[in-house]
Image (tube, rainbow, N blue to C red):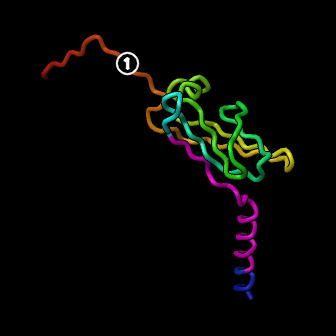
Amino acid sequence: MATIFRSAGVWIALAVATAATPANAHPATVHVVSCDAGSCVLVRGHRSTSKAVIRINDRVVEAQGGRSWQVRLPVTTVQDWSAPFARTLRISVADTALSTERTEAVRLPVGLLGHNLELASLVVRPR
């Protein structure tokens, strides 16, 4: 009798965990690609409907595609929208029809928003 209750508890826990995780909860991805502006950041993700609004760092962007969407932004725009030396982009997908919003922090490629420091000279001394 106790095993029946345990197995029922496992099934209930599995059902709750599955219901709490949306089916379209694929994480967004970020890549650096070539474009007319030189280098661009390509952000790809998924949304529940094609009418869901995409925001990157709290700015509404026009996404191409339907449920699988993508946004291409020049690196200079991402630099303007981000804090210096930022390591992530904040991406929000808001579906007004379902009254839901999902926000995630997506890692940027290493060193993308770093600054180049030009040295007038470099002194190297032996110890």
Quadrant of the image for the N terminus?
bottom right
Residue 54: image x %, image y %? 72, 40
The part of the image, by quadrant, that contains residue 14 is: bottom right
Side (left or right) of 67 relative to 75:
right
Q: What residue did someone put label 1 on?
A: 117
Side (left or right) of 127 relative to 22:
left
Q: Amino acid at mark 1?
A: Leu
Residue 51: image x %, image y %? 80, 46
Q: Circle 1 — which element?
A: loop
In this view, the residue farthest toward the bottom is 1
Which residue shows up at 85% across the image and 50% down it?
Answer: 98
Vertical order, 114 against 43 (above or below)? above
Does residue 21 appear in this view?
no
- The boundaries of the magenta stretch are 8-31
Q: Which one is in front, 122 or 9?
A: 122
Residue 30 within the magenta-colored segment of the rendering: yes
The part of the image, by quadrant, that contains residue 20 is: bottom right
Which residue shows up at 59% across the image and 26% down it?
Answer: 77
Q: Which one is in front, 77 or 119?
A: 77
Residue 99: image x %, image y %? 85, 46
The part of the image, by quadrant, that contains residue 13 is: bottom right
Side (left or right) of 83 relative to 97:
left
Q: Which one is in front, 2 or 37?
A: 37
Quadrant of the image for the C terminus?
top left
Which residue shows up at 40% across the image and 21% down it?
Answer: 116
Residue 96 within the magenta-colored segment of the rendering: no
Vertical order, 87 against 5 (above or below)? above
Does residue 98 appear in this view?
yes
Crowd rating for badge 1 (residues with CA inside 10 Å; few <14, some 14–19, many 20+): few
Residue 104: image x %, image y %? 65, 43
Which residue shows up at 76% across the image and 53% down it?
Answer: 48
